Image (spheres, coloured by chain):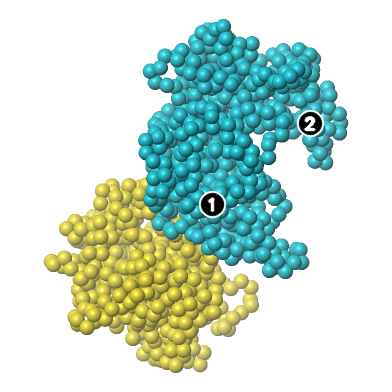
Chain colours: A cyan, B yellow
Amino acid sequence: HPHQATQMSNYCLNILVFVTLQQRDPMLKRDGFEDILEERRNSSDLKYALRCYAPVLYKGVTPCKANMLKNIVLQSDQLRYVINQVSQESGEAPDIIQEEASVILEEMAHRLQISTVRFFAFALSKAFKTLFQHVCVNEEGIQRLQQAIQEHPVVLLPSHRSYMDFLLMSYILYTYDLALPVIAAGMDFMGMKFVGEMLRMSGAFFIRRSFGGDKLYWAVFSEYVKTMLRNGFAPIEFFLEGTRSRTCKSLTPKLGLLNIVIEPFFKGEVFDVNLVPISISYERILEESLYARELLGVPKPKESTSGLLKARRILSEDYGSIHVYFGQPVSVRSLAQGKVNRSTYNLFPRHIPRKPMEETQSFVNDTAYRIVRLQEDNMVLKPWVLMASLLLQNLEGMELSVLTEQTVWLRGLALSYAAFLDWPDHAPTAKVVSSSLALHRGLACVSGGRVSLVVGEPLGPVTPEEALFNRAVSVLSCASYRNQVLHVFLRPAMLAVAMLHLSDEVYNCFSFLWDMFSNDFILCPGDTVQDFEEACYLLVKTGAVQMPQQDIVMTDIGQPTLSFFNGLLEPFLQGYQVVCRYLCEEASEGLTEKQYIPAVRSFAVKLILAGNLRCYEVLSSDMQKNALAALLRMDAVRKVKNRMISHINQTQISPSLSLVAVAEDLCRDGLTPSYIR
Amino acid sequence: DTVLAAATITMKLTSTVCFPRQEIMKWNGWGYSDSKFLFNKKGQAEFTGKRYRLSGMVLPSLQDWFENTFGASVNHKSPATPALNASAVPPASLNEAFVEDLKATGIPFSHEAEDRVFRAHGHCLHEIFALREGKKFERVPDMVVWPNCHSDVVKIVELACKHNVCLIPYGGGTSVTSALECPPEETRCIVSLDTSQMNRILWIDEKNLVAHVEAGIIGQDLERLLNESGYCTGHEPDSMEFSSLGGWVATRASGMKKNVYGNIEDLVIHIKVVTPRGVIEKSCQGPRMSTGPDIHHFILGSEGTLGVVTEVTMKIRPIPEYQKYGSVVFPNFEAGVACLREVAKQRCAPASIRLMDNEQFQFGHALKPQVSSIFTNFVEGLKKFYITKFKGFDPHQLVVATLLFEGDRERVLQHEKQVYDIAATFGGLAAGEDNGQRGYILTFVIAYLRDLGMDYYVVAESFETSVPWDRVLDLCRNVKERINRECKERGVQFQPLTSCRVTQTYDAGACVYFYFAFNYRGLADPVHTYERVEHAAREEILANGGSLSHHHGVGKLRKEWMKESISSLGVGMLQSVKDYVDPDNIFGNRNLL
């Protein structure tokens, strides 16, 4: 019973407010930052690149030569088992399979060389000084990391927004005399011959993007990673999100590598593994407009060395600052306490590959989400992020003074929700706003006291589609900044939407939104109630709502907050609605996944051109994919034979909160706010 | 040439009143009253008495080792209460009818406080610590009986059933699993059944090489008496100076030389047990039978919950012609384990092969007696130089395996060569007989050393497990790390000593023994802290594929893990046997289940 659920959760609230308080408050105590470029601007880069580099290692191990590492991997029981297995299945001699394994390893393995590292240290110093005002690092985090490296194998888990990320990571570790990580990189880099090899020599190892059924490949790969981890030769670094987030929202974590690095703990091969969440925040992302185009269906340029050289023009621009926050190392042992019974691994030889048990899988999944949440928590937000959020709710433009005033208001709200805001000290607000606008002049401009989004001017005559496309590029670029603050506001915003639309079944509506959006945002599986409590707590804390007995009601002063939150999620709601409409109205029975994205896009383009839709974000392939994934997950749409998408029988679904019902509403009422009944 | 000096408890039946073991044994510590470690006025360690190789010797390096390892000081003493305070012992609650009937049988008994307290405990840290502190006892046996033979036991058990009295069999009292602790919730009269008077070898059958022995006999007496006839059992658990044959059966004991002679389950041919339902025994002495599940295995490891083992027929062997100790130094623990694994694989393990980790190696060194001759000193120095400088072994990494070979001379020498050859392939260097022998001395004196530690704020304990070969290293490392971490988290102010050794090899795995000690200054409740750490260590063992116990048993200390270890169905099977054999829980020590 929905009402009971609300009652229950309200009851829980009393208890949980305290817990939530405790959970959120420590985050307020964040470390300060040091600018590592400052020293680079004052002393010789060459000296810096050639200085003595002697990092402390895990329990004092000596770093292992690349060749020795390969031998250990090739001779491991794990790999030998799989080689024999593959040999038996394929009828090939074990020697030949062994040779294959050796080739795979050759293609994969890093060849860390200190000289290359020094080259990068030099070149990156030059580049960073040109590109960025500051590269800020929390030194306390570095100290914690240094400690952790000596105690247990360490896995570095940075957020992924730019190609820059892993060079930057190694650069920072080199700067602080920490052990250089080995980094899992996608094979696509290998296309760039020279650069690929350079990266390899600075510690990257390369994995194919997909190798689903290839047992041998998986065995070589996982054994390679585990060997490095078990022996503590170097910290392992990879991106939980799997790929660069084109939207600046954190991506749903991928579990493959995390499974690999956690398994040695479950098997008792290491005492513990430390996972270190690292948040890399860019004030301006190098790939900004590239991403927007990519999301709109312009294919991304293939990584090539010449392409990289062309990107040199980037060097002439100001990209503001970077903040790198090394979070508290998370002990896998402590996380797994009481969740995974390690002795279930006792009855099976450890060298035989096995699918992880259900208990383990859900633990790894849970862990992945928690780490991404920790990354989000320590992402540094610039004032522009707040301004972008406001501008996107006023696409027709805003008076500068209004923007300034609302930015100040939003700043207060963000701070009370524990956002990690980097707001310049002692600077007048007008100054902050204007310098943000100056840095992002490619995205917004001021004319006649009004601020509006900049729309790229194409050469030659413009078709309506081209104009729309250009507008979409700037909206999506701007959205990538707003997206950075979403993790702060997401939960209260979903509550605000729920209150607006379904004030007597708030929890159910919240839970529906939570479920629907869990492909788009990082919502830890099973945390619905906790997130609801957190949302309530935050809205109550800022005075936007009151909770007399078992009700949630808006206060007199709550209106601006709630309406801002509604506006914040509006593009997502609209986007999902458009996808539902498309599926109900237009999609044919035999739609393939490949056809889906261009089809939704042209459906949306038609709606916009006809003046029936003002939401450009639905043109983003990211949102389209997430919406489809959500519909599939919620069983509103079903995949048949892997390629077909078919509508689910609408009569099958009766509860008022089903997505099909939402879609039905949509078709009838258009974009009225009553779409959720 | 046994490690033990030929000292023994001769407690022949002299009186009918009481048999005060406590006159020659410590009431609040390990072993003989006359043998103990102490720091003399010069601060040098000494081992008193005349019973052991080390007895009467000065151990010049022990103090440094002790102070450096534990952060302890010989100036910070934590002395034990000198004598048992009778008022701390709860008064005996006797079942008068039982006492009357018992008197009629003429079997000796006592309800003196000292007799009762002596049999109320084993040698767990918390038990000894409580004795030393003079803590009040919650529950001790209400009386002690000394049956003289099998039929005495039958009479006692019958009377116990008749009057609903709780019986707790008591052998050598060396339990380290809280097995002898009286369940505090037991309201019936508790009678400790001391088997020490049933200590005769009843007959020796040289044709079949078996001996029929009363189960109360103590290990060293059994060996000594058999030796007089030219035989031995070869069963030498580390506790053999004090533990009894019945106790070995009841706990599934393991002997140091099991590679030649087997563990207790391999050695027994016939067992006689008195239970509340009657006497269990087999009808013949066939060396192996296919007659359903072996009923001996209900008895072996039953930990006194089913009845009293009264007589055992046991395999014996002629005394080996030749015995030789040996030792091998390895550059690190990994190499040592790999070597032991290979030795086990080739099934050429000597009578005993043990691998001590670096901590124990250093500990062993600290126990070296003062060397009188300059020459020995010089040779020692040369050896050390050869190993550490010439061979490049890191003194903080190297480990030592101790070996004991037995058999006829020629074969021993052949065997020795085979083992040293294997060792060499793992980088092992032969390190002499002396080092080997010292390793085995350590085994017998280490329990005495715990008493010394407790005099200076250091608590210590050992625990063991068995584990498949491929997990030995991981288990050792993780358990040590877990102990260190738990100590830190629980406020132990000083770095603990965690040390392990591989003490037995099997085809499919090994027995690993841990020592763990820490300086408890600054802790409010050191025993509680200790117990939490040991608990965590045991969880770590289980999580790393180790067993709940290799030979110490379960007692009450490890009961909580039984279900996890043998499944609830398995526990149910054991419970149904208990329910059938002892429906009124006469043998109510509440061990195991």
Which is more N-terminal, label 2 or label 1? 1
- Which residue is pictured at 23% across the width and 80% down the height? B378
> Can residue A132 be seen?
yes
Above/below status of B534 relative to B365: above
Which chain is mark 1 on? Answer: A
Label 1 to label 2, Cα distance in Å? 41 Å
Q: Is residue B339 left or right of residue B148?
A: right
Density class for disc 2 (Cα within 10 Å; few <14, some 14-19, many ≥20) is many
B117 on left or right of A508: left
Report which quarter residue A654 is drawn in. top right
- Image check: B50 left or right of A530? left
Q: Quadrant of residue B13?
A: bottom left
Q: Residue at x 61, y 54 (%)?
A: A108
Residue located at (54% from left, 39% from top): A165
Look at the image and tell me whether residue A566 can be seen: no
Which amino acid type is marked by label 1? Met
The spot of residue A220 in percent (x, y) is 63, 57
In the rendered view, tell whether residue A370 sits above or below residue A503: below
Residue A105 place in picture, x, y as percent: 62, 58
Residue that badge 1 annotates: A201
Q: Quadrant of the N terminus of chain B?
A: bottom left
Tag 1 near tag 2, CB within 8 Å: no
- Residue B545: % across, % down: 53, 60
Q: Foreground residue, B556 or B353?
A: B353
Q: Residues within 10 Å of mark 1 (few under 14, many from 20)?
A: many
Q: Which amino acid lies under the numbered mark 2 shown in the image of this protein?
A: Tyr
Q: Which residue is mark 2?
A: A596
In the displayed structure image, the side of residue B341 where residue A669 appears, left or right: right
